[in-house]
Image (cartoon, rainbow, N blue to C red):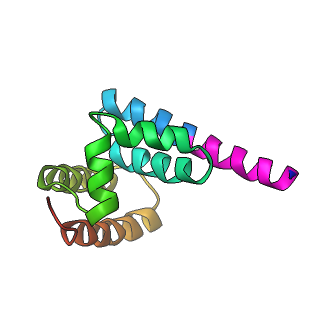
Amino acid sequence: MMLKLLTVSCWRFLAGISLLLGLIGVVLPGLPTVPFLLLSAWSAGKGWPRLEIWLLAHPSFGPPLKRWREHGAVPRKAKYMAAGMMSLSVVMLLLSPAPFLLKLLLPPFLCCVAIWLWRRPEL
């Protein structure tokens, strides 16, 4: 019983933190909104069904969450924005005094993320 309560609490904590970060992303440029909302809805489904239902029924958040759940779809506009932000991040990283290993590993990783993203269906 105690383990189940702890597990549910962890899922709720993750759902709440993810939702908070997603809501901050609505007003803070550069912080993504939808990935945090996806994580929030997923973790809420594990331990906070009421929050999951609210997110899926929300007029702004619900449609992208449902498109992702049903089809794994990402709108073209979001793909362009993500690719642009990743490109800008790489340029800023290369111009910064960041560690060489980071400059070496992050661009190929982001390239793989972009390829994966552009292979997602659009609805």
Residue located 43% across and 54% down the image: 98
* Front in this rendered view, residue 111 or 35: 35
Q: Does 60 appear above or below 94?
A: above
Q: Residue at x 56, y 37 (%)?
A: 16
115 lies above or below 22: below
The location of residue 119, given as percent across then percent down, is 20, 72
For residue 12, what is the image quadrant?
A: top right
Q: Looking at the picture, does residue 110 appear above or below residue 12?
A: below
Residue 110 lies in what quarter of the image?
bottom left
Relative placement, left or right, of 51 versus 73 is right
Q: Is residue 76 magenta?
A: no
Main SS of the magenta part reads helix
Residue 5 lies in magenta, yes or no?
yes
The image shows residue 67 at horizontal and vertical percentages of 26, 55
Q: Is 29 left or right of 51, judged from the image as shown? A: left
Q: Residue at x 35, y 38 (%)?
A: 57
Residue at 26%, 65% in the rendered image: 71
Task: Identify the image quadrant of the C terminus.
Answer: bottom left
Q: Is residue 31 visible?
A: no
Highlighted magenta segment, given as a residue range: 2-15
Could one spot residue 35 in this view of the protein? Answer: yes
